[in-house]
Amino acid sequence: MRKWQCTICGYIYDEQLGQPDHGIPPGTAWEDVPEDFSCPDCGVSKEDFEMIEAS
Amino acid sequence: MPKHGVVIIGTGLAGYTTAKEFRKNDPETPLTLITDSDGAFYSKPMLSNAYGTNKLPTQLATQNAEQMADTLKAKVLTHRHVMEIDLNDSVVLTQSGDNILFDRLVLAIGASPIVPPLEGNALERIHQVNSLADYARFRGDLAEPRKVAIIGAGLIGCEFANDLRRGGHEVSVFGPDALPLSNLLPAQAASELKTELGGIGVDWQLGSAVKTVNLNDEQFELILANGQSHQADVMLSAIGLRANLQLAKQAGLSTARGIVTDRFLQTSSPNVYALGDCAEVEGLFLPFVLPIMSAARALGKTLAGEKTSVQYPAMPVVIKTPAYPLVVSSPPAGAEGNWQIEETGTGLRCLLKNGLGQLVGFALTQDCVKERQALVKELPPLLNT
Ligand SMILES: Cc1cc2nc3c(=O)[nH]c(=O)nc-3n(C[C@H](O)[C@H](O)[C@H](O)COP(=O)(O)OP(=O)(O)OC[C@H]3O[C@@H](n4cnc5c(N)ncnc54)[C@H](O)[C@@H]3O)c2cc1C
Ligand SMILES: [Zn+2]
């Protein structure tokens, strides 16, 4: 499982946790996150995320 | 075949995002960015939650100018202050004497903090934070726990108040209005914000403007319109921003609150474009990240030869006050409405509805912030094609 970070506000999307509040169940791979996903903190789109080192 | 290519003035979010979007559509045409800063890429919103995210100013710069130049296949000219734009000869003149020719020019020169109208001898020593360099200086004064006075209870004032408390500083917030964020929030939400930030120790000194600030023996003394006096070690002013218009005015471009552009981000001169905190797009002055992202996406295409207009959906702004999570979507220009406030027990759902009962804006607090995504779909766009 990987983590993706918003390059604008630092929010981290953790594939393991998903984003249940936004209808994305735990375990959802980044590729399967809908294209219209936007950062829950600052609202920028999926393409403004970068993969970060899994910790 | 263009020779000089595209020149972008400014390497903030607007300048760099435009460059990135342009490169997606045109990998070849020469691209030059000019900035009076060091050209490092950083995310400005992170300045007001750096304590919360455990970041030092140096960690906020994620790429330096050289790395950016490399990824963008562009020239990035740093520490060059642009003095003048000559539209007849299509050339940009810098203070250090460079003449940079362009085929198309993008103004992404941002805004500047409004200088507070204060009497006293301390104005020069009051911080204003609108760049990473400003923030590094501010943090330099906060190496140990200090007593900080913030002037301005708007978005940035409230965010810093929350974040500086997390950093262990004493914080007082000053402003003439009775409630924080009073221009964005209905009174009930503003008053809860005040209470919750008060709960983490923010000291509110609202309802009377700061008139005079004096500095004696490294201690600030603030004197309010109502005669009260307060002390502080460090001061921050956050009373708003004004678009940088001087260059545009000097070049003869139309300006209003920002550099005036149409929906293609074109200024009153055909080969000159503007976006970001310096621009007013179709009458909208929106100094936030999301409008910049939408604008840069469109401009990246236009500059590559595929003329594309900006689309602004409703663009909620998350206010970074973790003590009282908040997200606000302001109504489109001219839309009137009445607040309907529902207390859910775990937050407020404030819906701004027009005369026809349609949703035109909202403010969601605490647990209700989760509803943002669903509600935003009901909102009218701010700018449509
Ligand atoms: C503390 C803080 C927190 C924020 N938080 C949020 C948030 O949570 N969400 C949100 O949506 N928005 C937020 N904003 C607003 C958002 O950060 C700005 O809208 C955005 O960063 C502006 O980018 P810009 O590129 O237009 O301007 P700037 O970042 O100001 O860039 C302007 C660039 O132009 C250069 N420049 C200017 N004049 C000249 C000249 N004459 N010659 C050469 N170079 C020049 C500057 O050096 C700089 O590189 C926040 C702002 C601040 C200050
Ligand atoms: Zn984000």
Image: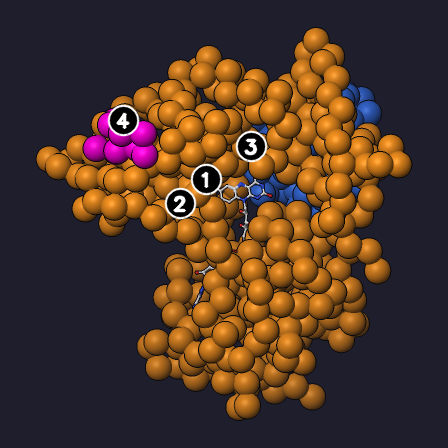
Q: Which label is found at residue B228?
A: 4
Which chain has been coloured orange in this picture?
B
Which chain has been coloured blue in this picture?
A
Asked if residue B15 can be seen in this view, the reply is no
Mark 4, mark 3: which one is toward the viewer?
4
Determine the CA span between mark 3 and mark 2. 21 Å
Question: Magenta span covers which residues?
Answer: B221-230
Q: What residue is at 68 percent from the left and 11 percent from the top?
A: B346
Identify the residue position indicated by label 1 in the image. B47
Mark 3, mark 2: which one is toward the viewer?
3
Say whether residue B122 is left or right of residue B257: left
Q: Are marks 3 and 2 in contact (CB under 8 Å)?
A: no
Q: Chain of mark 1?
A: B
Identify the residue position indicated by label 3 in the image. B182
**Disc 4, SS:** loop
Q: Relative to A12, is A17 above or below? A: above
Disc with the residue nearer the chain's start (1 vs 3)? 1
Q: Judge the density around disc 2: few (<14), some (14-19), many (≥20) Cα neighbours within 10 Å.
A: many
Disc with the residue nearer the chain's start (4 vs 3)? 3
Say whether residue B309 is left or right of residue B300: right
